[in-house]
Amino acid sequence: MLQKVSLFPLKRDFFLFLLACGFILTYALLIEYQNYKKLTYFDSCIVDATVLKQYTKTKETKRGKLKSYQVLKLKSDKGFSFYTTVSKNFTQVKGKKLQLIIFADAVTFHEYFTSFYARSIVLQVDKSQSLRNKLDAHLSQAHNNAAIANIYQALYTAAPLERELQTLFSNLGVSHLLAISGFHLGVLSALLFFLLKTPYKFFQDRYFPYRNAKSDLFVLVASTLLVYVLFLDAPPSLLRAFAMLLIGFILYDRGMKIVSMQTLLLSVLLLLSLFPRLFFSLGFWLSVSGVFYIFLFLIHFKQLNKYWQFFLLPFFVYLLMLPFSLAIFGTFSFLHPLSILWTTLFTPFYPLSILLHFIGFADLFDTLLESFMTLGKVQNTIPIPIEWLYLHIILSFLGMWKKYFMWLLLFYSFSIFVYAMYHVT
C-alpha cells in the first residue's frame, strides 16, 4: 500500500508558503485600508448596503421617558458591516438594498473590520427583489408559521434567525444546524454526487470512457456549490468549508494527506490572507474549531473500527465544543446533550426537506418543528469564566502532539459538562 505524502516535506517549503501568504495578506490589507480611507475621508459618505437584520429596541432617556426605535444591521457592497437606527415607524426593509448617507468619519480601522455604529440618512429603498428575496418570500408563503419559515430561510438562503429563535436553538445546542456551514456543504456535495453519478456514467460509457469520473464529477459538484456559495454572499463558515473541499480534493488527487492539521492550517492561512476580515468572524473560528476536533479524533483514533468512529465522533466533538458554547453564549439546558441526536437526525432531514419543498409538501414537517421549538423554551444561563476556555484551547493544541494531553482535554471537557448539568438539575 502506497503511503500518503506530506504537502510540505521540507521546512523551507512551508516557510515559502508562509511568505506567499504574507504577500497576499499585505496586498489585501492595502486594498481594505484604501477603502477605509475613502469611507472616512469626509464627514459623510454615500453607501449601498443590504439590510441583514431589523428589530425594535426601547431605552430610557435622560429624562426618564421610554423611547422606541428600530435598529438595522447592514452589509455594504464593499463588504463592511455596520449598525444604524431609524424611527420606530420605519417600513420593513429586511433583505432589501438601501442607499444611505452615513456619518463614519470617526470610525477606526479596527471597527471597519469588525462592525460599527453610524448615524445615517436613508436616501432610497430598492423595491426590486433579488432572486434571494424571492426565494425567501416563497418560503414565507409555503408556511403558515413565520418562525418555521424563518428556519427554512436560514437553512436555504442563510437568512439571519430572529433573536427568539436564536435563543431557542442555542438552549438545545443546535445553533450550528441553522447556520449554513461545512456540515450542510458536506450533505449537499454528497447529494449532488449521488444525483450526478448515474447520468455521468451513462454518457461516459458511450462518449468519453477515457475521462476520470472522480475528477469530472468533483468539478461539476464544486462548480454547483461555488454558485450556491456566491448566491449566499459567501458566509464565513461556508467559505471555509468550500476552501477545504477544494484543497482536500487537490491533495487527494495528488496522493497527499487530507486528514491532517496541516490541511486545516493551509486552508485557514489561505482564507485569512485572501479575506482578512475573516479574522474577526466568530462563525469562522467556531467552524475551524469544529473541524479541528474532528481531525484530532481521526488522528488519535484512526485504529478504531469505522463503525466505532462513526458512533463516537459526535460525542467527542460535542464535549470538546461545549466550553466554547458556554464561554461565548452561556446558555444551557438539560436537553442540550440531545443535540448529538438532533445532529444525527438532521442529516436525512436536510436533503429530504429540500425535496419536499420542490414537490409541494413544504409544510410536512411544520408540526414536528413546532413541537421541537417548545423544547427550547427551557433555559438556564451557565456562563463559564473565559480563563477556562483559554485552558481548554491550550490543552487542545497540546493534544495534537501527545495523546496524553488529548485524554486530559477530554477529562477537562467532561468535567465542564458535569458542572453544567449539575447547575440545571
Image: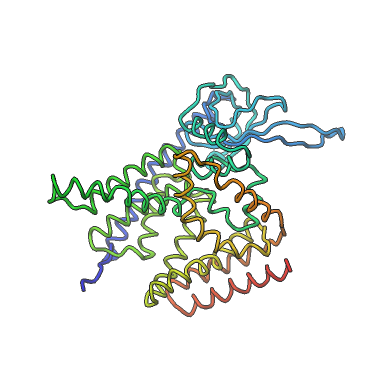
Name the residue at the top extreme: 123
In the image, taking residue 281 as reference, residue 307 lies left or right, namely left
Residue sitting nearer the eye, 387 or 170: 170
Residue 325 in which image quadrant? bottom right
Name the residue at the bottom extreme: 404
Residue sitting nearer the eye, 115 or 189: 189
Image location of residue 155, percent across then percent down: 51, 45
Image location of residue 354, percent across then percent down: 46, 44
Question: Which residue lies at the image location 57% right of the left edge and 76% below the top edge?
Answer: 411
Does the image show residue 243? no
Q: In the figure, 392 relative to 33: above or below?
A: below
Residue 232 in which image quadrant? top left
Task: Give the quadrant of the C terminus.
Answer: bottom right
Does the image show residue 178? yes
Question: Which residue lies at the image location 24% right of the left edge and 71% below the top edge?
Answer: 3
Question: Which residue lies at the image location 33% right of the left edge and 52% below the top edge?
Answer: 194
